[in-house]
Each structure stands twice: as C-alpha cells, then as structure tokens.
Image (cartoon, helix red, strand yellow):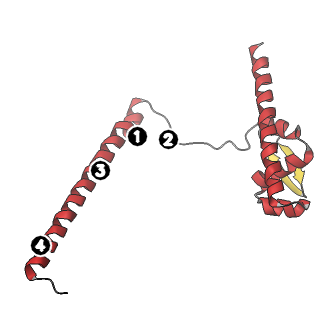
Amino acid sequence: MRYSEQFMEHIEYAFHAFCKVVLRHEAINAWRDLKRKEAREISLDYLMSERYFEPSAMDSYFEKQDKPTVFIVLGKKVIVDDERLATALSKLPELRREVLLLYYFVGYRDEAIGRQYGRCRSTINHRRNVALKQLRKEWEKLKHEEQKVDTF
C-alpha cells in the first residue's frame, strides 16, 4: 500500500515533534537529578576549607592485637578475626559450624557441601538456615553479655 507524499510528510513532522518532546523531558529529568544531587552532596573543596583532614582511608585487617581464631574445615584453614563471631561460631555444633564456614568463608555452594557430607542440596540448605538462626541467637547472647559487662 502506498502512502501519499502529504501523509509521509505528516508522519515525519509528527515523529520530529515526538522526538523533541522526549528530549525536552529527558533534559528536565537530568536537570532535576543534578539539582537533587547538588542539594545532597557537599563539595570536597568546601570540606577541605572548613576543616583540614587527610582524604584517605586505612584498612585495618591485621592491625588488631587479638589473635585471630583459626577453624579447620575439610583440611582448609578458615581465619576469623572478629572475636565475638569466633566465639559464637565455636558454640555451634560441629556440623552446623562447618556448613556455615564452607558456605560463607570458603565459598562452596550447597551442592558441593552436600557432596562432601553425602547429603542433598536441600538438606544442606536447611542445615545452613538453622545454623544461621542459632548463630544469630549466640551472637545476641554475647552482645547482651558484653553490654552487661560494660554497664558495671
């Protein structure tokens, strides 16, 4: 089907008008985003002039004086630096602790952990979820005990 020249010209003008509207609205959105960003962010130059500080960060992975706790799982060493986490993990039953360490620290997936222990993926997933709940309870107990000690 052939369209007339006049109809084709109308379509072209309509498309140009549509493109202009879209571009105008995108410009408005970009302007609005810049204003929002400007309202929430502070210039680094302003911060440097107000109070001098060195704009840097130091990682303190191994600066602690405490000795990290080492767990051995399937012949692999897992180092836990946080004392409270290590204490909470040590209070878990061995299998639950091993499942958590293998999943979160060594990076094994449920299928691989299941193969190591002769269980299916869903069983390992269930054990991991139960272990996380128990770990959370132990963590809260330790946190509560530390707060008691701090208040005395």
Q: Residues within 10 Å of mark 4 (few under 14, many from 20)?
A: few
The disc, 2 or 1, on the residue closer to the chain's N-terminal end is 1
Task: Left or right? Give the position of 97 relative to 136.
Answer: right
- Seen from the viewer's position, the closer of residues 12 and 65 is 12
Q: Nearer the viewer, mark 2 or mark 3?
A: 3
Given the image, on which type of amino acid does mark 2 rest? Answer: Pro
- Do the numbered discs 2 and 1 sit on residues whose CB atoms are within 8 Å? yes
Instruction: Identify the amino acid type marked 1.
Output: Leu
Q: Mark 1, residues whose alpha carbon is within 10 Å: few (<14), some, or many (≥20)? A: few
Q: Are discs 1 and 3 less than 8 Å apart at CB?
A: no
Q: CA distance from mark 1 to mark 3?
A: 25 Å
Residue under numbered circle 2: 55
In the current view of this chain or complex, which residue is farthest to the left?
6
Q: Are marks 2 and 3 in contact (CB under 8 Å)?
A: no
- Residue at (13% x, 70% y) in the render: 13
Is residue 143 left or right of 94 when viewed as pictured? left
Identify which residue is drawn at 37% across, 35% down.
46
Q: From the image, tell me which residue sits under label 3.
A: 29
**Three-letter residue code for mark 4:** His
Q: Please provide percent x and percent y for residue 111.
A: 80, 63
- Is residue 148 placed above or below 1 in the rendered structure? above
Q: List the single residue furthest toward the bottom.
A: 1
Q: Secondary structure at mark 3?
A: helix
Mark number displayed over residue 134: none
Residue 97 in the image: x percent, y percent? 86, 46
Q: Of helix, strand and loop, which one carries label 4? A: helix
On residue 10, which mark appears? 4
Query: Marks 4 and 2: which is nearer the front?
Result: 4
- Check disc 1 and report the residue beneath it: 44
Q: Quadrant of residue 22?
A: bottom left
Labels 4, 3: front one:
4
What's the residue at 16%, 86% (across, down)? 2
